Image (spheres, rainbow, N blue to C red):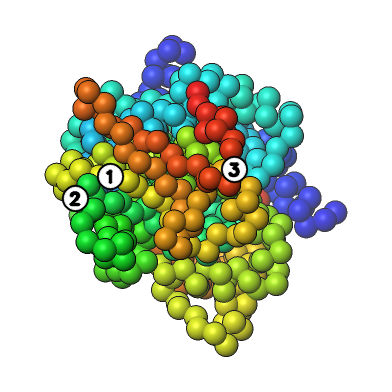
């Protein structure tokens, strides 16, 4: 009998349903979601402050990317492109951009502070979605990730303040588990396909990608002639660290290694792209794996003496 | 009884989640009991929803570059879900790298109406004012610098696809915005592409060379109702006016 079979036999489980059920529906402490909630709340607040600063100039009534231009590019009137499913109040009322930004900012601050329960991430997501649907071509790398994390936090925001009140204890929640697992699963799927996307192109194999990215004026790491090897090193580091971290994050034993490898990946991305919001969102997203999640019961039985 | 038990199970997670230690129920200290508290049918329903959602996420991620007809059909079917939730996103992918070297070189510049005095050289130096350029000369902090990059990246794509109509639509928005904030009339606008490939230049009727700068050039036309329109200049070497109307909806 293999180890796995013996473990399953110990738990008297109906594999795979029991494993699936334990993974997704075993109540988890909402405490696990706190770093994600606070992090996403802070980053969403920064995003809405930036929207407050420039969205009127870009998406307002006489903005650089007016409504008619946006409608043209989303394929308005062409049903096969799905433009009829793009919903944003900013199409009809472009002057509301500042108000939507302000509402989103309040909700995001509430989310960071643990105020408003599910309402806070829901309103923040709705506000963010107004901008994404209004001008999907202007959405930056980190914004869709921010939006989907807000959506997952609606399932359970882990909002019990910064910490539970004195004399209280975090309660276990099934919804907290579902929210956490969705964040984890989406993270891994995203990482796997980004890796697949990268290694399908030669620039990520021959090391040119890092050099090309470093030539952009926004890169934090500016490379001059003769420093090509640094670009090549960074390219290889990105590919290897992303792959290794995805593998390491899958196992409890290697997860702590994976965290450091993931930090290397995020640091390389930050240096080469200069997109600090993107790097910050990736860091917060990885918090879903940071504390070791509750193990599956067939593993726990073995580890508990 | 069934309704009562379901109601209780559904409302439990919405209750005040911070309870004194002595009020914690046994289900919270026993995970197995806590898991068993949600009914099987609810778990089955939630499982289906989770699988559909994760399947959609995988599908969207897998059609980043190319897609099969099957994927295309499924994506079209689930458009209300994917587009409604705006699930599309990309990561550190190939497009980011391929556009990286170009975005910095593109810029949008306008020529004001009162810039017609002086010698030709003076006019050239003075008249073309850059209004959208991604950190080309100014390394200061701009909150909208990433949006400028996105706009220029979109223009790169449109130029590569020889979509003059799309380029002119964007330039029109930029001109209208510039006029509204500067209170100065714009005479002409151009999208500059300093290091365009010779093959691209030959392939596109929209690209011209003016004053040594390869660009897409358009003149501003004003209508009686105050509306602004752009008329794109087509290279004199080619006579393919139909290309201008190619992508008009």
What residue is disc 3 on? B238
In the picture shown, does residue A172 fall above or below B68? below
Q: Quadrant of residue A116 in the image?
A: top left
Residue at the extreme left of the image, as rendered: B183
Seen at 31% across and 66% down, the residue is B121
As drawn, is A152 to the left or to the right of A67? right
> Which chain contains the residue that carries disc 1?
B
- Return the disc, 2 or 3, that comes first in the chain's sequence: 2
Whether residue A206 is visible here, answered yes or no, is yes
What residue is disc 2 on? B114
Q: Is mark 2 on a helix, strand or loop?
A: loop
Q: Do labels 2 and 3 share a chain?
A: yes
Across and down, in percent, residue A189 comes to 60, 48
- Return the disc, 1 or 3, that comes first in the chain's sequence: 1
Residue at the extreme front of the image, as rendered: B119
Measure how far apart labels 1 and 2 are at the Cα level.
8 Å
Q: How crowded is mark 1: few (under 14 residues within 10 Å), some or many (20 or more)?
A: some
What residue is disc 1 on? B187
Seen at 74% across and 29% down, the residue is B69
Look at the numbered discs 2 and 3 and tell me whether their residues touch, using CB distance below 8 Å: no
> Which chain contains the residue that carries disc 3?
B
Quadrant including the N terminus of chain B: top left
Across and down, in percent, residue A153 comes to 38, 41
Look at the numbered discs 1 and 2 and tell me whether their residues touch, using CB distance below 8 Å: no
Whether residue A248 is visible here, answered yes or no, is no
Q: Which of A286 and A88 is in front in this view?
A: A88
As drawn, is A115 to the left or to the right of B219? left
> Which chain contains the residue that carries disc 2?
B
């Amino acid at each position: 009998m293999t180890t796995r079979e013996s473990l399953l036999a110990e738990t008297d489980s109906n594999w795979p349903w029991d494993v699936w059920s334990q993974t997704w529906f075993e109540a988890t402490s909402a405490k696990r979601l706190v770093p994600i909630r606070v992090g996403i709340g802070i980053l969403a607040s920064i995003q809405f402050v930036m929207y407050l600063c420039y969205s009127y100039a870009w998406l307002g009534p006489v903005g650089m990317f007016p409504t008619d231009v946006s409608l043209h590019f989303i394929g308005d009137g062409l049903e096969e492109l799905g433009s009829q499913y793009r919903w944003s109040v900013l199409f009809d009322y472009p002057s509301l951009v500042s108000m939507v930004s302000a509402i989103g900012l309040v909700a995001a601050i509430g989310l960071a502070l643990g105020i408003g329960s599910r309402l806070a991430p829901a309103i923040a997501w709705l506000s963010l979605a107004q901008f994404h649907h209004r001008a999907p071509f202007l959405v930056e790398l980190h914004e869709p990730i921010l939006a989907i994390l807000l959506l997952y936090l609606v399932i359970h925001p882990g909002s019990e303040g910064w910490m539970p009140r004195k004399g209280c204890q975090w309660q276990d929640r099934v919804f907290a588990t579902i929210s956490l697992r969705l964040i984890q699963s989406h993270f891994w799927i995203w990482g796997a396909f980004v890796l697949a996307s990268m290694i399908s192109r030669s620039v990520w194999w021959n090391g040119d990608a890092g050099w090309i990215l470093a030539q952009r004026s926004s890169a934090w790491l500016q490379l001059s002639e003769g420093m090509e090897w640094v670009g090549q090193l960074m390219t290889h580091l990105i590919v290897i660290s992303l792959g290794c971290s995805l593998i390491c994050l899958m196992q409890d034993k290697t997860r702590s290694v994976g965290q450091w490898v993931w930090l290397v990946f995020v640091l390389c991305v930050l240096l080469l792209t200069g997109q600090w919001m993107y790097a910050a969102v990736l860091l917060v997203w990885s918090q879903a794996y940071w504390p070791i999640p509750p193990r599956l019961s067939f593993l726990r039985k073995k580890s508990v003496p | 009884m069934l309704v009562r038990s379901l109601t209780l199970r559904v409302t439990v997670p919405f209750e005040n989640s911070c309870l004194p230690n002595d009020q914690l129920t046994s289900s919270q200290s026993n995970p197995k009991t806590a898991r068993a508290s949600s009914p099987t049918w609810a778990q089955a329903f939630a499982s289906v929803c989770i699988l559909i959602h994760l399947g959609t996420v995988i599908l969207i991620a897998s059609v980043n570059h190319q897609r099969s007809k099957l994927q295309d059909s499924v994506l079209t079917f689930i458009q209300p879900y994917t587009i409604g939730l705006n699930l599309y996103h990309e990561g550190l992918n190939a497009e980011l790298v391929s556009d990286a070297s170009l975005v910095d070189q593109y810029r949008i510049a306008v020529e004001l109406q009162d810039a017609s005095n002086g010698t030709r050289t003076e006019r050239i130096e003075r008249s073309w004012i850059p209004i959208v350029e991604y950190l080309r000369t100014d390394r200061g902090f701009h909150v909208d610098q990433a949006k400028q990059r996105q706009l220029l990246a979109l223009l790169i794509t449109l130029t590569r696809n020889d979509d003059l109509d799309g380029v002119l639509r964007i330039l029109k928005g930029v001109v209208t915005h510039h006029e509204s904030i500067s209170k100065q009339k714009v005479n002409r606008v151009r999208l500059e592409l300093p290091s365009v490939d010779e093959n691209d230049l030959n392939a596109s009727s929209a690209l011209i060379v003016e004053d040594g700068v390869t660009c897409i050039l358009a003149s501003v036309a004003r209508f009686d109702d105050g509306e602004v329109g752009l008329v794109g200049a087509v290279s004199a070497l080619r006579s393919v006016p139909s290309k201008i109307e190619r992508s008009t909806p």
